Image: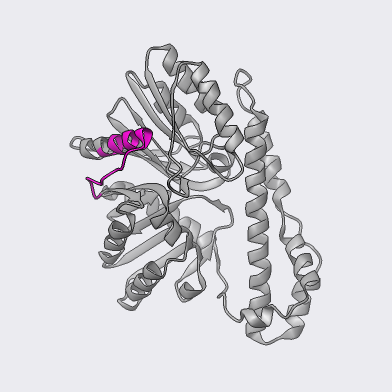
Amino acid sequence: MTLQFDVRQRRNHVKLFIQPESGIEPIVDALNKAKKSIQILIFRIDRSEIEKALVDAVGRGVSVQALIAYTNRGGDKNLRRFEMRLLERGITVARTADDLVRYHGKMFIIDAKELYLLAFNFTHLDIGLSRSFALAMTEPKLVEEAIKLFECDAKRVPYVAGNDDLIVSPVNAREQLMKFIRGAKKQLLMYEMKVSDRDFISLLIEKVSQGVDVRIIGRTATQGRGLPTRSLPMRLHTRAILRDGTSAFLGSQSLRRLEMEARREIGVICHNAKIVKQMIRVFDKDWEQSAPSIPQDSISDALDVPARKVAKAVARQISVRPVVEELLDRVMDSKPNLAFEPDEVVETVREAFREEVHDAVVNALQEMMAAAVEGDSQNLVKSLSKPAEKGPKAGS
């Protein structure tokens, strides 16, 4: 099923892709339509369709430049093997510098005319099993700025921001995102992996006090416990801020100090109200299906619980098997003529397991904190001794 929205305004052409509904097809289609050039930035990949589309592009005379992250968590060897395969097929490969903690942006540019800004990686987990978004935009000055950024990072020369709508960490992200949030008059709807930067938390609390409707799907640090926050039942892999129904930020950077100041993160601000309204409809549906987050205080009481009981609670929370099973089903259902790269898929599965363990620890501690807040020791004991709940079936 392909779900995308296409809006044309004057010279500007904007498309929205919603994951997991849109799937891999529109991304592959965009690469297959390239006539002159492809410039693609890759942080993590296990989708053979993308690699095949890049190789096919070279075969029809398209100039393909791939800028590969010098590292990602646990997947350096896979990245180096991927680089060698591309070089063998005639693709120009560059590697990002190691001056920043991580090069985490996700984008590609087609024929120097259309920018695709993604919040997800080229992986089965991000595309097939996670809530995420991508935007395709043809605004000439924005595309020109993205090309400038790509070439600066490929050549390892400093990038100087020249367009306020291209949000680049650590260059202009803090300044522009603070300005963007500060400009909200009525509403801020946010998908956030974790809001932890004190300046952003203070600004969001200030906006709430001004009567702005602030809602967050994701997580916040303890300082932001007063902000309306819910946890999405499906995996979340996007960072987006929808402002007043008329403009939106989409990118790879969360509102965390590290991602503002020590990593290459890339985002855009979209001023297309029709596209923003489509994103709001998705947000509202997700908000209705999400559970309120439990305030993360009374930690000292929760920490009095024996570690063995904490471990048991965490073990009951872990349900990575259904995720892995569905992921492998999707891989095996891929077209038979596509190469299967087990190392890349293994790394994706490892990433899913790390995330599941992390979420299990958080959920277990939140249960203990909630019981501590209520002051009901019996509820706390019950929360740690109740029978394990079965995880959802694959495909549910």
Bounds of the magenta segment: 145-164
Q: How is the image coloured?
A: one colour
Query: Is residue 246 placed above or below 119 in the rendered structure?
Result: below
Q: Quadrant of residue 203?
A: bottom left
**Tag count:** 0
Query: Is residue 17 placed above or below 392 in the rendered structure?
Result: above
Query: Is residue 108 placed above or below 193 in the rendered structure?
Result: above
Please provide percent x and percent y for residue 123. 55, 37
| Foreground pick, 151 / 341 | 151
| Foreground pick, 77 / 134 | 77
Please provide percent x and percent y for residue 330. 63, 34
Please provide percent x and percent y for residue 380. 73, 79
Query: Is residue 7 placed above or below 365 in the rendered structure?
Result: above
Magenta run includes residue 285: no
Instruction: Determine the residue located farthest toward the bottom in the rendered image.
Output: 375
Can residue 277 be seen here? no
Magenta run includes residue 149: yes
- Kindly identify the residue that appears in the image at 63 percent across and 72 percent down: 366
Q: Is residue 367 left or right of residue 140?
A: right
- Kindly identify the residue that appears in the image at 26 percent across and 39 percent down: 145
Please provide percent x and percent y for residue 213. 36, 69
- Kindly identify the residue that appears in the image at 58 percent across and 45 percent down: 73
Instruction: Determine the residue located farthest toward the top in the rendered image.
Output: 60
| Foreground pick, 16 / 56 | 56
Q: Is residue 207 left or right of residue 396?
A: left
Can residue 158 be seen here? yes
